[in-house]
Image (tube, grey):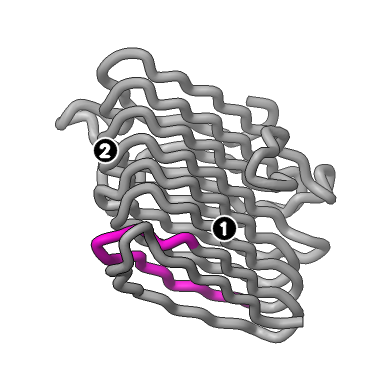
């Protein structure tokens, strides 16, 4: 931790979990989420085995806050969250931003896994303005999904996402100056692979529930904005 008013507050149970936290600047928090409450009484906020958590937060300009929270009984999950910067691709392991020395913060990620084998990568970054970005991701038993989320730009971005099926791949990109919002729930007997891009200066909104009954899975690809 390098800066002022940065904090980490969590409890952990079981074996072979790896955590790597890096907070630079001010007002960065990694903690259990207030409306879920601390998981200490039932075994820990990180309650499972072989989970890998890498959380990086950068907040170098202004007085806004970054926050990462979680409630995640489950095993073998890989989580890499980058706030104040983003990843170039789903395979990129470097959390780097376009404005690393003028990052306003104001980003929030809440995670609630209750499942295993997921690889989740989330990046959120402001532009030249003080935009706020928020991701809520609940898997609710969805196993072995590969999820890559990027939110960046001057407009506020909001994503609510529930993944209930196994083995899918989801890529979500919301960027540019518009205030974009997506509410996604993936249901059905089989997984859905999804690619969603919302971009441009005009506000975009997208909502999907889905009910995939196709053996081998379904696919959805959506682009909105210019």
Q: Is residue 103 above or below residue 3?
A: below
Quarter of the figure with the N terminus: top right
Asked whether residue 219 is drawn in magenta, I would say no
Q: Horizontal placement of 116 versus 1: left or right?
A: left
Considering the whole magenta stretch, tell me its main secondary structure. strand
Crowding at dot 2, Cα within 10 Å, few <14 / some 14-19 / many 20+, comes out as: some
- Is residue 85 visible in this depiction of the protein? no
| Label 1–label 2 contact, CB within 8 A | no
Q: Is residue 203 above or below residue 122?
A: below
Residue 82: % across, % down: 62, 42
Residue 140: % across, % down: 26, 52
Q: Which residue is at a point 75% across and 74% down the rendered structure image? A: 177
Asked whether residue 180 is drawn in magenta, I would say yes
- Circle 2 residue: 38
What secondary structure is found at the residue carrying circle 2? loop
Q: Which residue is at a point 37% across and 21% down the rendered structure image? A: 50
Q: How many marks?
A: 2
- Circle 1 residue: 171
What secondary structure is found at the residue carrying circle 1? strand
Provide the residue span drawn in magenta.
179-193
Q: Nearer the viewer, residue 192 or 61?
A: 192
CA–CA distance between discs 1 and 2? 30 Å
Q: Is residue 221 above or below residue 169?
A: below
Residue 72: % across, % down: 31, 38
Q: Is residue 162 above or below residue 74?
A: below
């Amino acid at each position: 931790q390098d800066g002022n008013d940065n904090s980490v507050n969590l409890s952990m149970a079981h074996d072979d979990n790896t955590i790597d936290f890096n907070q630079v600047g001010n007002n960065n928090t990694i903690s259990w989420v207030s409306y879920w409450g601390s998981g200490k009484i039932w075994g820990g906020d990180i309650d499972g085995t072989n989970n890998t958590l890498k959380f990086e937060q950068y907040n170098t300009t202004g007085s806004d806050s970054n926050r990462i929270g979680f409630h995640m009984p489950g095993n073998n999950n890989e989580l890499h969250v980058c706030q104040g910067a983003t990843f170039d691709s789903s395979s990129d392991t470097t959390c780097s931003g376009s404005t690393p020395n003028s990052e306003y913060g104001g980003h929030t990620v809440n995670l609630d896994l209750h499942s295993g084998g997921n690889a989740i990568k989330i990046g959120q970054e402001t532009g030249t303005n003080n935009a706020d970005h928020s991701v809520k991701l609940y898997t609710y038993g969805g196993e072995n999904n590969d999820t890559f989320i990027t939110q960046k730009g001057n407009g506020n971005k909001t994503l609510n996402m529930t993944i209930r099926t196994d083995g899918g791949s989801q890529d979500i990109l919301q960027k540019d100056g518009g205030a974009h919002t997506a509410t996604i729930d993936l249901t059905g007997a089989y997984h859905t692979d999804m690619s969603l891009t919302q971009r441009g200066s005009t506000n975009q909104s997208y909502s999907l529930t889905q009910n995939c009954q196709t053996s081998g899975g379904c696919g959805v690809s959506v682009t909105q904005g210019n």
